[in-house]
Image: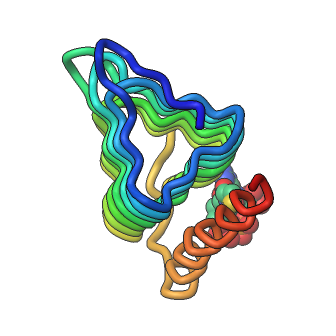
């Protein structure tokens, strides 16, 4: 797996976590059971730590980083991060959702089941509350998600756990 030490620290993967070929995971990074880091993702835990919880997925081409002395990155359980997202020095709580191409800047928080839509830019320090949907650049609160949307987002995250197993199995 493409794991690299930095400053004496090696990324740590729980059983069942998967890092795809072409991804790069560096330094003080912990990845939980069943989580998946997809093709060409960079997770760089050099100047602060990065934690990624169980069954969360970071989709292809995304970047996860931190800010020195200011902001670590913490991603909870069952979080979905869409393709080409940028997750920087922030906290994504359990079952939150970051849409494809979205940017989450320093000191932001997305609370459980909160959603940042595709292409949005969450500016520094903003907080998305539980089940809130935010859209746009800069992102603004739009509305609350209904039960069906929360269930769909959860199914998306669960689907990625299964898809990761298939990819992993295909690679032998
Ligand atoms: C926001 C989202 C959930 C759609 O919500 P919705 O309420 O069903 O939105 P609709 O498609 O009915 O569109 C309603 C309006 O919002 C706009 N809109 C939809 N998605 C938007 C987005 N991401 N950003 C800004 N505006 C958006 C539409 O253009 C439309 O505007 P209009 O009324 O001026 O025509 C969806 O677009 C989205 O971002 N999904 C995330 C998908 C993703 O990233 N998946 C990860 C990979 S698996």
Across and down, in percent, residue 104 comes to 46, 37
Residue at 58% in and 43% down: 120
Going 47% across and 48% down the picture, which residue do you hit?
Answer: 140
Residue drawn at point x = 59 percent, y = 37 percent:
1
**Is residue 111 or residue 61 the one in the foreground?**
61
Q: Would you place residue 162 above or below residue 60 in this image?
A: below
Looking at the image, residue 74 sits to the left or right of residue 34; the answer is left
What percent of the width, then of the height, locates residue 95?
42, 67
| 78 with respect to 68 (left or right) | right
| Furthest residue toward right | 170
Instruction: Name the colour scheme.
Output: rainbow
Q: Is residue 33 left or right of residue 111?
A: right
Q: Give the quadrant of residue 14.
A: bottom left
* Quadrant of the rendering where the C terminus is positioned: bottom right
Residue lying farthest bottom? 147
Quadrant of the rendered image containing residue 8: top left
Q: Dividing the image into four equal quarters, which quarter contains ligand 1?
A: bottom right
Image coordinates of residue 145 in percent, x first then y, are: 49, 75
Task: Determine the residue located farthest toward the front in the rendered image.
Answer: 172
Q: Nearer the viewer, residue 42 or 80?
A: 42
Determine if residue 132 is in view.
Answer: no
Question: In the image, what residue occupies the spot 50% across and 43% down?
Answer: 139
User: Which is more toward the observer, 133 or 66?
Assistant: 66
Q: Is residue 81 visible?
A: yes
How many callouts does the rendering have?
A: 0
Could you say where residue 86 lies in the image, as x and y percent from the top left?
54, 34
Task: Give the answer, above or below, for where 124 lies relative to 132.
Answer: above
């Amino acid at each position: 797996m493409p794991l690299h030490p930095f400053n004496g620290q090696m990324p740590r993967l729980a059983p069942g976590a998967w890092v795809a070929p072409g991804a790069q995971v560096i330094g003080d990074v912990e990845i939980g059971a069943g989580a998946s880091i997809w093709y060409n993702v960079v997770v760089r835990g050099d100047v602060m730590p990065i934690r990624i919880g169980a069954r969360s997925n970071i989709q292809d081409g995304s970047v996860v980083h931190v800010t020195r002395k200011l902001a670590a990155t913490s991603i909870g359980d069952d979080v979905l991060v869409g393709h080409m997202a940028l997750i920087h020095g922030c906290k994504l709580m359990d079952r939150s959702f970051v849409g494809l191409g979205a940017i989450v800047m320093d000191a932001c928080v997305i609370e459980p089941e909160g959603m940042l839509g595709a292409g949005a830019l969450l500016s520094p320090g903003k907080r998305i509350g539980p089940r809130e949907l935010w859209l746009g650049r800069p992102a603004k609160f739009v509305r609350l998600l209904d039960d069906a949307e929360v269930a769909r987002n959860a199914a998306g995250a669960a689907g990625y756990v299964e898809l990761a197993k298939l990819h992993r199995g295909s690679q032998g």
